[in-house]
Amino acid sequence: MKQESFDLVVIGGGPGGYVAALRAAQLGLDAAVIDERDTFGGTCLNVGCIPSKSLLESSHRFVEARDGLKDHGVIASKIDLNLTAMQRRKKRIVARVTKGVAALLYRAKAKTFNGRATITGPGKVSVSGKKGDFELAAKHVIIATGSVSASLPGVEFDGDRIGTSAEALAYGEVPKHLVVIGAGAIGLELGSVWSRLGAKVTVLEYLDRILPGMDLETAQETQKVLEQQGLVIELGVRVTGVKTTKTGCSVKAEDRAALRCSHVLVAVGRKPFTEGLGLESVDIEPDERGRIPVNDHFATATSGFYAIGDVIRGPMLAHKASEEGVACVEQIVSGYGHVNYEAIPNIVYTWPEVAGVGKTEEELKEAGVPFRKGTFPFLANGRAQVLGDTVGQVKVLAHEKTDRVLGVHIIGPQAGDLIAEAAVAIEFGASAEDLARACHAHPTLAESVKEAALAVDGRALHF
């Protein structure tokens, strides 16, 4: 078996792993990164964030062309769907971005390996792949293997009609009736895609609300909008089983008749992927949720081993993993690395988009933190009027005494981009007054952030 030695070996080439390897190379470490796939980028770039956003954008444009252009004076006599072309575009984008990651690693002189990684002992990782077997030695090993779709008791995936997001991203035809189990970001995004393209979509959620963990008021408004768009959302439904039939699927739930449909998407969350990694060989024991325990510096209980991203505590977000990858490497090299978890945005790419950063109203109330709230509707924003996207609002939550921004929550056009300003504000400890005093160009959607900040002190000018 071939043997190679490195300063750092990263297991997992997703947004956490490859970014960690890039930062390590920048800081002068001889780094290697291993990924089980033939292409780098992890779930996010290959079968997650990027392909789903491609279909979301394409399906949104389809609906806009069909229903939204008349008001602009653009008359399209016939709008047809070419799903094959839409899927082909998605694949091109995925290929482009994954090749881009490989090019970044090559340029940084980070060694790459494609194959199954197994920890075999202190500072030892074996790789089994198409190009043979390797044994890698390193003083430092970062585990960044990400997550996989969680399963549901009583539901067996068949890779066709009953599947996860991976299958729902690759349908060759529009489902007649898609049942989505789970009303989180993944379920609502993919439900929106296929609803726009003509499917009947029913979303079944066990909880009494959609988008658990996000601001409740914003989530409730999101549900109203999605239902107006045609999604059927049923809350408080406990699915107990799914079976295939001659014509499709049958979904069973407590206290209700079976629901018949053509396809089922199970989107009940994700779980850390550490199966077969060999953690036991170095005495690393996952917790009850399968996560690898780490301290505040991403170090496990075993010297020389670290973990980041979806395999540790915290939200399973690609950008969170990237931040942790950088901080972990900087901690290894300099003794200091930090991630401000209060300033990590969460975005749902439905239409309208939903985004939040910092604390929600519910969290502040539960903690007994005094706060003031300012809101501003996109209906009163000139740029939103021009775009024809006036649904939603910006909400700014600030400490009642210090005025420090504690949370910002947005439902509306380009919420995912607008939330960046709020993340910067929280990162630097800005006040609502700081946001309000900053000059925002006109006409822009960002003016709504300024107005919501003004509204914290009852000074909104345009509403």
Image (cartoon, helix red, strand yellow):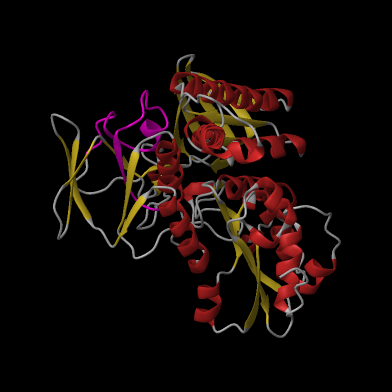
The residue sitting at the top extreme is: 131
Q: Nearer the viewer, residue 131 or 257?
A: 257
Give the percent coordinates (x, y) of residue 377. 64, 64
Left or right of 49? Residue 333 is right
Q: Is residue 215 above or below residue 364?
A: above
Residue sitting at 60 percent across and 30 percent down? 75
Give the percent coordinates (x, y) of residue 258. 15, 48
Total numbered labels: 0
Residue interval drawn in magenta = 156-184
Query: Residue 353: within the magenta?
Result: no
Give the percent coordinates (x, y) of residue 330. 71, 48
For the C terminus, the image quarter is bottom right
Q: Is residue 148 above or below residue 137?
A: below
Q: Decide if residue 139 is in sight here.
A: no
Q: Nearer the viewer, residue 1 or 182?
A: 182
Q: Is residue 100 above or below residue 193?
A: above
Q: Give residue 22's quadrant in the image.
A: top right
Q: Decide if residue 5 is in sight here.
A: yes
Give the percent coordinates (x, y) of residue 115. 47, 24
Residue sitting at 85 percent across and 64 percent down? 438
